[in-house]
Image (cartoon, grey):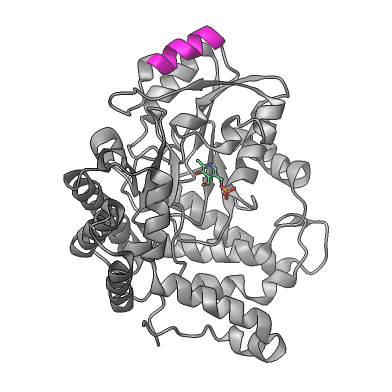
Amino acid sequence: MPVITEPAPLAALRRQDPELAEVILAETARQADSLQLIAAENFTSPAVLAALGSPLANKYAEGYPGARHHGGCELVDVAERIAIDRAKALFGAEHVNVQAHSGSSAVLAAYAVLLRPGDTVLAMGLPSGGHLTHGAPGNFSGRWFDFVAYGVDPESGLIDYDEVHAAARAHRPKAIVCGSISYPRHIDYAAFRAIADDVGAHLIADAAHPIGLVAGGAAPNPVPYADIVCATTHKVLRGPRGGMLLCGAELADRVDRAVFPFTQGGAQMHTIAAKAVAFGEAATPAFNGYAHQVVANARVLAATLAAQGFAVTTGGTDTHLVLADPAPLGVLGQVARGRLASAGLVLDTCALPHGEGRGLRLGTAALTTQGMGEAQTARVAVLLSGVVRGDLDPRAAREEVRELAGEFPPYPAG
Ligand SMILES: Cc1ncc(COP(=O)(O)O)c(C=O)c1O
């Protein structure tokens, strides 16, 4: 059983509200005692957690640094300016808005800047890996805009840029969205820009997933190509749960007004301070090494799963993401996920581009933060395959998972 260090503020919570403290501690233990393969998750640093749990959470701060609707904002203004300046330097952006509460809020704000209700938008279809904000019927995007979808090549699983171009010419969208929840390859932002220019469309890059790899120099940067880049701060980037928007100087005011007051109220200053901490961490050589190791681990994960009989979409990965179909092993994705959960291997399933069943969506960001390299990742892939195939008893696998997790605690003592 790994040693679980109790975060310091929890001691106070435990005295006042033992019931809730118990839940937080149990969740902390669950995270340390199992392996987190959910591609959208990571472990933030203790410094990020400290900022999140700081008294900045108390402060109301509607508006922007130097122009707030509330008094007493001088110091949170400093925190927000630090976050903005660090993000601008990290991504080479002329303007960054760090107030978006989440990735979805960032996309909503980008649409508010560039679109009007009823406009046509071309985005990756949900079955191919588009996000809910890319036109799902139950999301504001599907209700307020007329989305048309591009897919991926059913054989290769790759974006077919000629197909995107043909769809853009046929539908003349007001904006094109590039970005996905499960596409494991680099996106050719220059190709999307050329297509958008050809049809007079805006280009929105939803880089929620790869933005951390961009920060670490392990993936191409959409900032020079897109009118607006939307992103999250909590995936590979390893910051607090939140969003941001990056754009050129000419859209700066409109982006800021689309976040506040159009779609949001008071900024969450503790989260913004935590974003600043994460941007500072992401600017270090250590983070560059981390981002490249995330990709190296994902490549090993993809290759090992393929060797074990999974159908790996696109044949591999360029990123932290691997999409693997267990169908060739005679197991449905949902069934595989259940078996893996009982072995302490936590992941999710998602739609497969060829349209049948669900695949396992895996990511290496959290394992890599724990310090695991290629050897450990290959071991995880072999364990996972054995459990999915049914050769390995999930209880035996659970013990191995526990042992491995114990060797690489996400929050080592001291
Ligand atoms: C491509 C993409 N866009 C937007 C989001 C939304 O982020 P959030 O869950 O923070 O709203 C996600 C989240 O996974 C995503 O993958």
Up-down: is 283 above or below 204?
below
Q: For this rendering, which residue is in front, 300 or 168?
A: 300
Q: Quadrant of residue 322?
A: top left
Residue at figure coordinates x 70%, y 57% from the top left: 65
Residue 286 visible somewhere in the drawing: yes
For image coordinates 58% across by 76% down, the residue present is 24
Main SS, magenta residues: helix
- Classify the position of ligand 1 by quadrant: top left, top right, bottom left or bottom right: top right
**Residue 225 visible:** no
Residue drawn where x is 34% and y is 61% of the image: 287
Q: Quadrant of residue 56?
A: bottom right
Quadrant showing the C terminus: bottom left
> What span is colored magenta in the figure?
163-171
- Residue 3 % position (x, y): 39, 85
Residue 300 within the segment the image draws in magenta: no
Numbered marks: total: 0
Q: Residue furthest bottom?
A: 15
Quick one: 341 or 1, which is closer to the camera?
A: 341
Is 16 on the left or on the right of 329, as rendered? Answer: right
Q: Residue at x 27, y 66 (%)?
A: 372
Q: Residue 231's x, y, as percent? A: 52, 45
Location of the N terminus (image quadrant): bottom left
**164 magenta-colored:** yes
* Occupied quadrant, residue 331: top left
Q: Residue 89, position in %: x, y? A: 46, 52
Q: On screen, 235 above or below 4?
A: above
Q: What is the x, y in percent for residue 130?
A: 50, 33
Quick one: 407 or 244, which is closer to the camera?
A: 407
